[in-house]
Amino acid sequence: MKEARMSEYLTKSGLSVHPLLVDFVEKEALAGLPVTPDQFWSGFARLVAEHAPTNARLLQRRDELQSQIDEWHHKYGPVANNPQGYEFFLRDIGYVLPEPENFTIETTGLDPEITTLCGPQLVVPVSNARYALNAANARWGSLYDALYGTDVISREGDLAPGAGVNTQRAQAVVERAAAFLDETLPLQSGSHRDVTGYHVEKDGDIRRFVVDTSNGRTTLQDSSAFVGYAGTEQSGELVLRHNGLHIILVINPASPIGSAHRAGLSDVIVEAALTTIQDCEDSVAAVDAEDKVGVYRNWLGLMNGTLEDRFEKGGKTVTRKLNPDRQYKDDHGAPLVLKGRSLLLVRNVGHLMTTDAVLHDGKPIGEGLMDAAVTVLCAMQDKVNSTTGAIYIVKPKMHGPEEVAFACTVFASVEQMLGLAPNTVKIGIMDEERRTSANLKAAIYEARHRVFFINTGFLDRTGDEIHTSMEAGAVLRKDEIKNERWIASYEDRNVLIGLACGFSGRAQIGKGMWARPDDMAAMMAAKSGHPSAGANTAWVPSPTAATLHALHYHQIDVFEAQRRRHNQAVPPLADLFSMPVQVPFSLSREEITRELENNAQGILGYVVRWVQQGVGCSKVPDINNVGLMEDRATCRISAQAIANWLRHGLVSRDEVTATFERMAGVVDQQNAGDPLYRPMGENLQSVAFQAALDLALHGADQPSGYTEPLLHAARRKVKARNAQKQ
């Protein structure tokens, strides 16, 4: 779409606003609300005028602190040379701040998915309606489908999936599901493997869950686990509960799967993605008013329940929309309603970027200010999400308590301009920048009246660690960094500080993403560590992964894990600041080349889709052809790693350029089947290739090492060229 010229902008309370945004706000977002267009625009103008100077000052403070840290490393070298001096220096310059006295967060009005229920969390680009709907509907998932379709069940030999249904594989799925039921919902005698019938029997005013086995009738060890039912004696659904999560046994002897089961069990449905972050940030490529309105429109549709998407699948047109609630009767025969959708949170952008969708005194405004106002406005249309009226905003990439306090002040201004009660807007703090990690207790204190989660984002956190220590020396290889003491300290501090601030039973403590969506067996082996560590939730890359990860929350009682960890000592700041540098000459040229190629391939594979097609999150094969979920956070790591090695002479500018040119051909081959893809290897002057290369060559000079400035500029250039061709 052709960008509006300045003369086409509309004046709203002194702001120059893109006509697409005006139309959306006034004709869609405000529809039916007790807020007039004049009230919105005048309030928004006051918001911008009041908070833009503070936003600019906070960004300047980031640069000042980084310059001082760079100077310290120039003088003293790596932190390991003088760890006590480094920590004293950070306190002296105000990077590390005094901790507040002990306190307990005071947030009220939160939904149970945040406070008392524990389970997986999805993150999905809200710009893609189909993905957004799939994630919202991932509250419930078929365990049979998740097991059959992934490598959790071996794909070797007789269990290999084929064109049709592999009956041996299907039987392995049924046996695995029965083992899960035995572990989670054990019978008084026998095993779920031996069940010949599941029933509901009336006993006076009460309905009881009974089970027939080859050895006679039995029931559950915990009779309170049975909570509801629907259907008839011959077919229907039986609702059970364990650790607060529901498990639904689907009885349908007439179905192909149920007919092969002695009890007619055709599926086991598990409560999976309790919460979903609808993302406006790292997984989204929204660079102008057209893109932003598309993001906001999808978020509005999720809030008012109208979002739909139509697509072709198997030669048929499929319409996807939000699932309704699930209707049952409880054990007394009274109505029982289970929420049909994940509780939706929205992630705004951070404080850095600006947008020319709105101009103030002729200059682009802070994009975060616009996100705050418009996403909250859209959430006021909520008809299907929060049962308490809460509005959940995840705020990323904040550097320290002052920036958290600023975000809370902005949300308070938005509440006032829209007539909302104080603290209606809740804030999720992404603990993904080192200054926030080092001052997490103080950051939580600033948000104590509205905080609903803290979450480790180890990808951005690693990128920030590399950039903050850019001048200390050559960084370790990416795989080595994952095993460093500072990462373990960071993860532990997030949980333990959250517990000390009273999060247990009041708010979420979260963990980061499993980045290999095709490796579900490995995920099941590894990701149980997240609830075991005391995390209420952890990120997963797909609805299928959410279904599988949900099993961990049955195996592990998170609140018991939190009680166990509550009084553990918080790792000291010395651990948090302990990332070592590469020992000089410890890597061979082959190892350096391999790491450089892997990073270059990841950057190119991600950036080319971002710039050419506006795809903000991609599954990109690494150098070993393992598909990895890539977004701006992973791209930030790779770009900063190359920039660091370039800075310290492990690689040269010519070597980096030659590697990118060589890997462009590899990425072209990987995308050969995409009709929308434009090869880079035959056009090394393309906008996409040059943007990817610039992220590496100029990564050290980017603000906090972020990729957004270069990516946004490149995508806007491509969109402008495409518009000229139309």
Image (cartoon, helix red, strand yellow):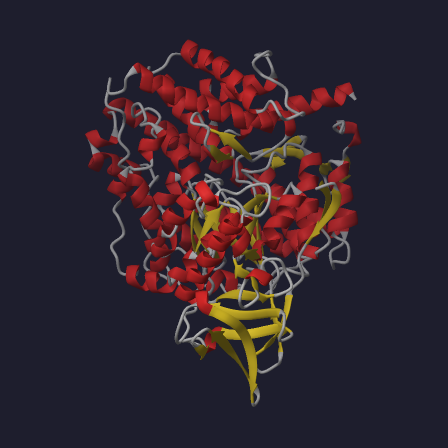
Q: Is residue 6 left or right of residue 325?
A: right
Q: Is residue 138 left or right of residue 492?
A: right
Q: Position of residue 627 (x, y in %)?
A: 48, 33
Q: Position of residue 81 (x, y in %)?
A: 20, 29
In what quadrant of the picture does the N terminus appear? top right
Q: Nearer the viewer, residue 607 or 146?
A: 146
Q: Is residue 498 left or right of residue 615?
A: left
Quadrant in which residue 358 is drawn: top right
Is residue 109 in view? no
Q: Count numbered badges in the picture.
A: 0
Instruction: Tell me the residue at 32%/41% (across/down).
Output: 487
Q: Height in image: 679 above or below 241?
A: above
Q: Position of residue 154 (x, y in %)?
A: 43, 45
Instruction: Tell me the residue at 53%/72% (across/down).
Output: 197
Instruction: Tell me the residue at 55%/49% (across/down).
Output: 543
Q: Nearer the viewer, residue 638 or 659?
A: 659
Q: Height in image: 706 above or below 430?
A: above
| Residue that sits furthest to the bottom in the current view | 204
In what quadrant of the picture does the C terminus appear? top right
Q: Nearer the viewer, residue 644 or 424?
A: 644
Quadrant in which residue 19 is drawn: top right
Instruction: Tell me the residue at 51%/66% (across/down).
Output: 246
Q: Position of residue 686 (x, y in %)?
A: 60, 15
Q: Height in image: 638 above or below 407?
A: above
Is residue 657 in view? yes
